[in-house]
Image: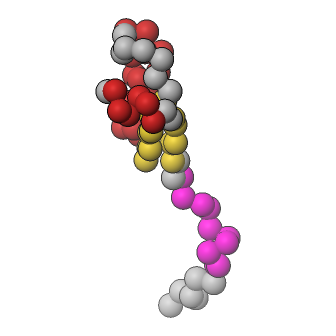
Amino acid sequence: MDPPDTASPTDADPPDETVVVSGIQPSGRLHLGNYFGAIRQHIDLLEKHEAYYFIVNYHAMTTV
């Protein structure tokens, strides 16, 4: 019979849980530069990690 595991939770390796948080401040209409500069990378991160994105400008939310 094996002895009971006496390792405490602090001895264990922490889980690899990356959370991405990013805000986007729009400066005009969406264009290819936005896509290649930021949006594509955000989509890649979203597929691999838990992610939260938000618009940091109230005016942008009322004109979208």
Relative height, residue 52 to residue 55 (above, below) = below
Q: How is the image coloured?
A: secondary structure
- Residue 18: x %, y % from top left: 52, 47
**Residue 12 drawn in magenta:** yes
Give the overall secondary structure of the magenta segment: loop
- Residue 18 appearing in the image: yes
Q: Tell me where the magenta segment starts and ends, as one range.
A: 7-16
- Residue 5: x %, y % from top left: 58, 82
Q: Residue at x 34, y 27 (%)?
A: 63
- Residue 45 appearing in the image: no
Give 22 or 16, whichever is nearer the viewer: 22
Question: Which quadrant of the figure has residue 49?
Answer: top left
Relative height, residue 62 to residue 7 (above, below) = above
Q: Quadrant of the C terminus?
A: top left
Q: Residue at x 50, y 27 (%)?
A: 25
Give 44 or 33, whichever is nearer the viewer: 33
Q: Is residue 53 left or right of residue 14?
A: left
Q: Residue at x 40, y 22 (%)?
A: 40
Q: Residue at x 38, y 34 (%)?
A: 61
Relative height, residue 51 to residue 33 (above, below) = below
**Residue 9 drawn in magenta:** yes
- Residue 30: x %, y % from top left: 36, 15
Residue found at the very far top of the displayed protein: 32
- Residue 8: x %, y % from top left: 64, 79
Give 13 or 38, whichever is nearer the viewer: 38
